[in-house]
DNA sequence: CCAATTTGCGGGAATGTTCCCACGAATGGA
DNA sequence: TCCATTCGTGGGAACATTCCCGCAAATTGG
């Protein structure tokens, strides 16, 4: 048991220098004689010196840490986005503190407190489906801590956002279904509280309009993303007098569950009913039948959001308030349609 | 723009007290008059005072942060384990710093440096499939930073470990296959570098032995978990003169991919070939056919590991060196067998 | 050769908190 | 009434580092 972290003072004493000089040598300041710097560097290496970030952060008021708050870890979506974000963050010298809110507002509020306690230099946020009040997030703004939303954004805050073109993705999916001969297309949508649900619904409606397919509100169901409920809604759709011949689901897990329900009813996918998802989760290509879905550049979303955040931290962007990055989606046609 | 974090000195001045007293009042020390404490607490609340953890950590040499290093985020396994770990960590007042090493040794080494720079109080580690040298992890031991392994453990380090009974899980899976009439059971195993592969292989062999089924080394294939290669190996198995009638896969993604390959060959699962996986990933019940698999208490693994780590940090365990928690698995029989 | 600039380094304050020591007042027992 | 204890508080060091200021020596220019 030794436990005396070696400090710059230890190095200074050993070399008969002052801590100031050692500090300068280590941080690469110019005004220090090359030989001196060399000696310091060598001794630091030899003593296995580790700079104490706590002390540095205390002075500089920068922790080189960014926080990431995501609603869940169940699908591969957020883990993938996080990988992307970490990629650019670590390249820029930042570590990440990750919190998941379990789709609960209360947990999200608690998570913001964790971020404040950790004095993060900025936060990446994707809100829960429950979040309707944004006071806890506005605290960051008040404290001057940069914030960037991705995927699940908050429209009433003027901060950068990274999203995909949900409208366009939905439009193209539905358009494709119509062009491949489907006549009655249902949409199992997400909750209205989420902007992405709304946009996908609008894309769905627009595609119908384009082809003069009348919009039947019986075929639009908005639900709370609780996967267990899919069974109820799909069963309901199948029991309609005039049931759909295609279902466009708000995300892949919903689509996968939809397929199961359809099959349990003895119907075939895609022969009787086509199913299309959204997001292209890791597993969507592996299931049977492989799922037709709208693919998002998830990792890229994480990367973009992190880059935006770091630029903001470094004050490299002028009018960041208005920045909204909209990434492109891509329709991946597989066997389920 | 104000940017002067309110400190205990601000509170002290306002109330004509010394910072010492304010500090005592806030930390709940007994020797401070109730009225004084009350006044401090109220003003702190009013000024939205936030204690500066950096300064505290600098003195106490505790950051109340634990690090988690996992090899990947692709399957639902590690995200789930992390949720479990965070659960108990946050309850104990710890925040978590998460790193994923992308199954690469180099990244894992870099991640350990991140942990050291962050002065974590302890680390939870699951190694990559490439990791053969453990020097970077032994640094933690040398510095007196507690470490707990889970899932992918390092046998040559004497630290607590949390694993499932891989041997038993594999044994029961194969035993079940034999008892349901399968005669030639192949095992698509993980790399020998991972202890879990070895144990599952041993369980596989033991089950064969018990039923006097001769072990045919043609039917045991160890691969590097690169999912693209599954196709090669399964095709190879199917092309054997005496092909298997069941395949026990080292994990669920492998099993799922195996099913796809079998079907592309025009064979049926489970009629022609049964397939069993390991881990019971989130999607395994959703695919077609639903996968028979050995389920692990993943979240519980995370919880247990975190608890073990925190106990160790708090010196609440005496002989932690020898602690190895072995959690039980459970065979989940579905339609793929 | 002297003044002016540059070079290299040391001293000390500052960052926000905890913790030890001490000090005065109040309270207690004898 | 006097000494001893307790109570509530203040002062200051410590934690590891940065950064500003200043100072001496060395170098430069005329």
Image (tube, coloured by chain):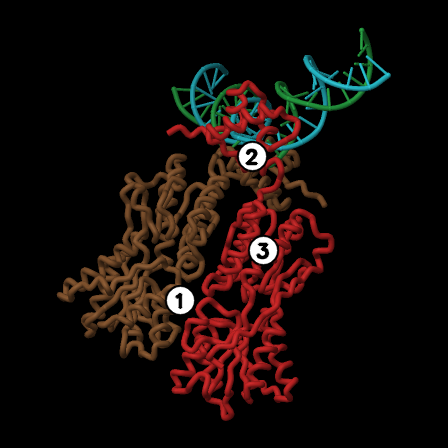
Chain colours: A brown, B red, C cyan, D green
Name the N-terminal-most of marks 3 and 2: 2
Locate the N terminus of chain B and report the quarter of the image it occupies: top left
Disc 3 with disc 2 on a shared chain = yes
As drawn, A138 above or below B85: above
**In the image, farthest residue toward the bottom:** B241
As drawn, B299 above or below A315: below
Image coordinates of residue A163 in percent, x first then y, are 31, 53
Any mark on residue B62, and which? Answer: none
Any mark on residue B124, and which? Answer: 3
- The subunit letter for the residue under badge 3 reads B
- The subunit letter for the residue under badge 2 reads B
Any mark on residue B55, and which? Answer: 2
Image coordinates of residue B96 in percent, x first then y, are 53, 49
Alpha carbon of mark 1 to alpha carbon of mark 3: how far?
26 Å
Which residue matches tag 1? A282
Residue density around tag 1, few if under 14, some if 14–19, many if 20 or more, within 10 Å: some
């Amino acid at each position: 048991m030794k436990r005396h972290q070696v400090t710059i003072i230890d190095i200074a004493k050993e070399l008969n220098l002052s801590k100031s000089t050692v500090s300068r040598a280590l941080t690469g300041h110019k005004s220090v004689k090359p030989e001196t710097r060399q000696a310091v560097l060598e001794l630091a290496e030899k003593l296995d010196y580790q700079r104490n970030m706590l002390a540095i952060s205390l002075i500089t008021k920068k922790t080189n840490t960014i926080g990431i708050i995501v609603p869940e870890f169940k699908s591969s979506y957020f883990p993938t986005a996080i990988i992307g974000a970490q990629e650019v963050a670590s390249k820029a010298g930042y570590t990440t503190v990750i919190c998941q809110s379990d789709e609960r507002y209360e947990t999200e509020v608690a998570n913001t407190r964790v971020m404040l306690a950790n004095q993060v230099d900025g936060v990446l946020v994707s809100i829960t489906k429950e979040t309707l009040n944004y006071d806890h997030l506005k605290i960051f703004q008040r404290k001057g801590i940069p914030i960037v939303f991705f995927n699940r954004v908050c429209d009433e805050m003027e901060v950068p956002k990274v999203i995909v073109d949900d409208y366009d993705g939905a439009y193209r999916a539905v358009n494709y279904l119509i062009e491949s001969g489907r006549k009655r297309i249902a949409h199992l949508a997400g909750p209205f509280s989420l902007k992405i649900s709304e946009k996908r619904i609008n894309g769905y409606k627009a595609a119908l309009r384009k082809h003069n397919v009348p919009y039947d509100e019986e075929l639009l169901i908005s639900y709370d993303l609780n996967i267990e409920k899919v069974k109820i809604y799909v069963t309901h759709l199948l029991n309609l007098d005039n049931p759909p011949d295609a279902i466009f689901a708000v995300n892949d897990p919903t689509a996968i569950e939809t397929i199961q329900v359809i099959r349990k009813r003895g119907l075939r996918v895609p022969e009787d009913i086509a199913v299309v998802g959204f997001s292209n989760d890791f597993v969507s290509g592996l299931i049977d039948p492989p799922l037709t879905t709208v693919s998002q550049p998830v990792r890229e979303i994480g990367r973009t959001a992190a880059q935006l955040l770091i630029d903001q931290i470094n004050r490299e962007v002028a009018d960041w308030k208005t920045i909204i990055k909209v990434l492109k989606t891509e329709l991946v046609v597989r066997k389920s349609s």
